[in-house]
Image (cartoon, rainbow, N blue to C red):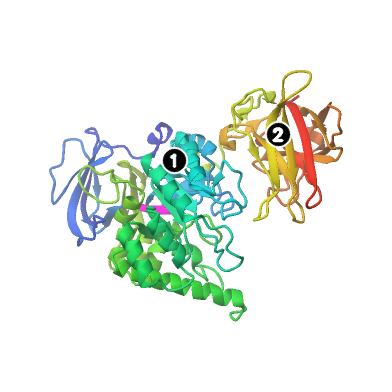
Amino acid sequence: MLGASASSEAASSGASGATLIAGATVFDGTGAAPRTADVLIRDGRIAEVGPKLKRPRGVRIVEARGKALLPGFIDVHTHWTPNGAPAALPQIATAYVTSGVTTVADYHQAPEAWAPRRAWLSELAAPHVRMTARISTPGGHGADWADTNTTRWITTPESARAAIREVVPYKPDLIKAFIDGWRYGTSPDNTSMNEDALTALADEAHKAGVPVTTHTVTVDRGKVAARAKVDIIAHSLQDREVDAEAVAAIKASGLIYAPTLAVYEPVKPGQAPPKDMDSPRVKQSFRKFDYALRNVKVLHDAGVPVALGTDAGMTGTPHGVSTLHEMELLVRAGLTPSEALVAGTANAARALGLDDRGVIAPGKRADLVLIDGQPWRDVSETRKTYAVFIDGRQVVGPGIALPAGNARTALAPAPAKALIDDFERADGRTSLDTLRTDGMDGGMDRTVQVSQTIDRPQGGKALALAAKMSIEAAPNASVILPLTRGSVRPVDATGFKGVRFDARGDGGVYQLNINTLDGRWRAEVEAGPGWRTIEVPFADLKRAPGRGGSDAPWTGADLLEVELGGSRPAGAKLWLEVDNVSFY
């Protein structure tokens, strides 16, 4: 995926529009023995593969004698989160392409963010990114921190089918269902997804042509996933050794197993061992990882295809290098280096339903990696990246410069518009055509809130927020007004003095939050039963605690969202009505 702005900085094909990779030792991704061959690329596809191919007039030649040529690696499970390493989208993209990873599935974004992120990626040297819709249960994993647009909540077959129908217009590449409420033995399982709901979810997704992966970490829930006919089990079954019934069910279902060993490794590369190896928590982590390793081998030996996934972006699991390390861990689990390479190429492509990549053969997408080594003998030699091709264009290698956009950390800001939302639209979107979202606190016991537009007696609409606080130390409820679609591109509001809005409420203190690329800024306001207009100068904003960011002063040039809400004592209620939110 390389946009027009990048093409002038990457190596171009010859006058014929073709590139010939000459004399490489080709590992084609099928598991066949490596062989010496030329690979001809034309129009982003592999045109021919064979020894001593005829060289078309004007073809660009890449001499590859002594080097290994493999399909680009594919990671079926990543999280492009701002809490990962690296954190910003361009640097994440760079980490993957420089590691020879040419396709990934991202499980982190709200559907609203997919279109602007896809557009951003098209300007960079980046892997193909498969956007994933998330579906969980109330209080379930994935629903304990996100709004219901980012992670939809279901409990029944009817709600499962409705959730799929809601996300399909966004054109998801994959559906992730959080089906396992066993939180690694740290809390009771009261959030697992019912089998009938998962079965309906998978059926509805398949009708739309979208594969389904599950967050599954226990043997019993692995059987549920198999019976429901999902496509991928993501994460390791790690509560015990898989039994014969589970192996038979998983094999019979035809699903693919992506164990994400990298995220579960108790002592990750570069980390020091725990100081207290005898603590129950540490012992449990080693015990679970041992089960995870054993179960990969058992399932693989039974004929269950294994695919590469990492959960990269999570703590201690950096992007790019973790994909390569996952193949090393698969070898540690008992696969051969060649089998680990197939897991990271052909099997991963199959898991994502992508029959146009993952092997080196005529007609396939020319996503390729050249390596200084023989990784089918020593899989750690995948780290010796020499050159990378995406859609036939070389993006990494000697003399190849990455596009300037890969060095940036954010998109250039758009000019802020004065009116943010007057709540007159009936489709739940702001005056800026962005999707309003709810911002209640996180955790299994979350604040219950309802936000909806209402009629004002004097005419027009307003937004009403009503909430009952969760039983937590600092519960909160809010409505978030994104300033651009998906809160991806910031806006520059330096031409304004502050935020103005009409409000009335229960007489308590509320917060105006402005979320920026550099953290959250806050001001407290009060609202009683009568409507009044409130103005908050930017100069009155203070940095909100615990939301990251630097110590830099307010600039007003990197705004993402305006948020209105408040906090009350645990179990108490809050109500707030607002209208005509704008910059002034």
**Which residue is label 2 attached to?**
556
The amino acid type, in three-letter code, at marker 2 is Gly
Question: In the figure, 140 relative to 583: above or below?
Answer: below
Q: Residue 11, image x and y in percent?
A: 34, 40
Q: Quadrant of residue 304?
A: bottom left
Q: Residue 354, image x and y in percent?
A: 32, 46
Q: Earlier in the sequence, mark 2 or mark 1?
A: 1
Tag 2's secondary structure? loop
Is residue 468 in the magenta section? no
Of 336 and 481, nearer the camera is: 481
Q: Main secondary structure of the magenta part?
A: strand
Of 335 and 379, nearer the camera is: 335
Q: CA distance from mark 2 to mark 1?
A: 33 Å
Q: In this orientation, does residue 308 appear?
A: no
Of 390 and 77, nearer the camera is: 77
First to last magenta residue range: 73-77
Q: Residue 582, image x and y in percent?
A: 72, 26
Q: Residues within 10 Å of mark 1 (few under 14, many from 20)?
A: many
Q: Quadrant of residue 112?
A: top right
Of 11 and 276, nearer the camera is: 276
The residue lying at 45 percent from left, 61 percent from top is 235
Query: Does the CB distance between marks 2 and 1 fall below 8 Å?
Result: no
Q: Nearer the viewer, mark 2 or mark 1?
A: 1
**Which residue is label 1 attached to?**
172
Tag 1's secondary structure? loop
